Amino acid sequence: MKFQVKGTEFSNILGTVIKGFNSKEDNSYVAFKLDDKNDELIITSRSRATFFEGKIKVHSVEIEEDEPRVYHLDGVKLKQLGSILPTAPINIEFSINDKTRSFTIKTTASKYKLPVLSETPLAPAPEVTEYSTVDANDFMNVAKVLIKILSTDPSTQEHQISCMHFNISEDKLKMLATDAYALGSVKIDSSKIDLDEEKDILIRHTELATLLGTFSPGETLTIVGSDDMFGYVDENGTLSLVGVINMSPLDISQVEGVAKDDNKVVVDKNELKSAIETVNKLSPNDERVDIELDEQNNQVRVSNRYGDYIDVDISESEFSSPGTATFATSVLIKSLNPANSGSIRLEFGELEEDTPGAVKLISLQADGSDDTQTTLIATKMMR
């Protein structure tokens, strides 16, 4: 068997599909299937919780009638080759015979060997429904920020309070991330394809990380899923699927109900974030940060337990009972990150000493109005 592919096309498809291979799983595989009738090479990778598949045009095909069309490959080696093979629009030639048990890969200036593993039947591609389409960069930009909220501890990822929740409706895709302490929810525009009613999907941090990618401006993703998988098809026709958590989504109305709108202040998001990060660096053995509302000086004082502090100016305020709220630094930062740059309004609730609860962070638009597509909450700590 011989065939050739274009370097740019092969690199683009392989760069996505190889993400579905997990070298730590014995049953994870990468496979090449040559469809000589349609002059296509189908690249598939699968693990316990993923299924990725892409197709690329081939040319200069030479194959015998009785030759196999499917080959399982060394995924570790293929991943290494993917990083060094040319990404230019030049030809890459693959050739194999049963004696060598490896693909010989040639370019104009290089030659490599790719081991072929024992033959096993390919698992069928999951049957999925096309739910909606979204702007690829809107989806990825939000997902890349919200994933920072999710817990990376494997023991906590099989639960509604530590995962990403996707809610697909007729014209919106809502992404909600929580780790039980911080919560971020952002809605982006979508266009329905096949959706009779709202669809809820929960996925783990590990699977969400596998779906993350980079796209050119203007690209569109088709959001797809089944009972046990969720993902998208990109404009190359590459299918990216990961496993879901078969649980009902968290009712966040209870969490939102904890946050009250007493003691409101508007500050610059980046100034506040910088102040929190700075005082945190000065207290490496204590992960807490205090936020004090200073009505007299119209400031928010950000401090640590060593007495270091930074004052942040308030542009608007409404105090009912000024005081101090204590947070785990990581929780507050994770809740701040998804907000728009510029001004942000913090609603602290009552600030009596040792009062638990949550602060609501209202992301503001450039004109000062509330960004109604974003919900951000950080829980307070006992002082």
Image (tube, rainbow, N blue to C red):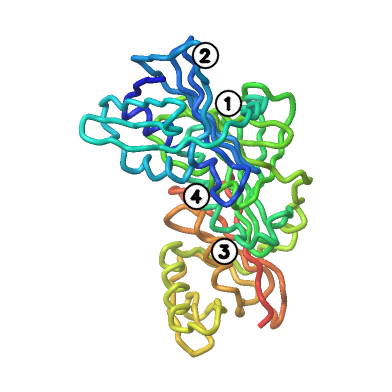
Above/below status of 331 relative to 23: below
The mark found on residue 144 in the picture is 4
User: How far across and how far down the image is residue 347, in percent?
Assistant: 61, 64
Is 279 or 38 nearer to us in this picture? 38
In the rendering, which numbered label is found on residue 346? 3
- How far is disc 3 from disc 4 in space, using C-alphas? 23 Å
Q: CA distance from mark 3 to mark 2?
A: 70 Å
Who comes first in sequence, dot 1 or dot 4? 4
Instruction: Specify the quadrant of the image occupied by residue 11.
Output: top left
Distance (Cα) linking label 2 and label 1: 46 Å
> Amino acid type of disc 4?
Lys
The answer for how far apart the CA atoms under marks 1 and 3 are is: 33 Å
Whether pointer 3 and pointer 2 mark residues with C-beta atoms closer than 8 Å, the reply is no
Rendered image quadrant of residue 360: bottom right
Q: Position of residue 250 (x, y in %)?
A: 75, 51
In the image, taking residue 353 as reference, residue 7 lies left or right, namely left
Q: Of circles 1 and 3, which is in front?
A: 1
Compared to residue 181, the image places residue 207 above or below, namely above
Residue 14: percent from the left, percent from the top?
Answer: 43, 34
First in residue order: circle 3 vs circle 4:
4
**Left or right: where does residue 271 sit relative to residue 328?**
left
Q: Earlier in the sequence, mark 3 or mark 2?
A: 2
List the residue tagged with mark 1. Answer: 191
Give the amino acid at mark 1. Ser
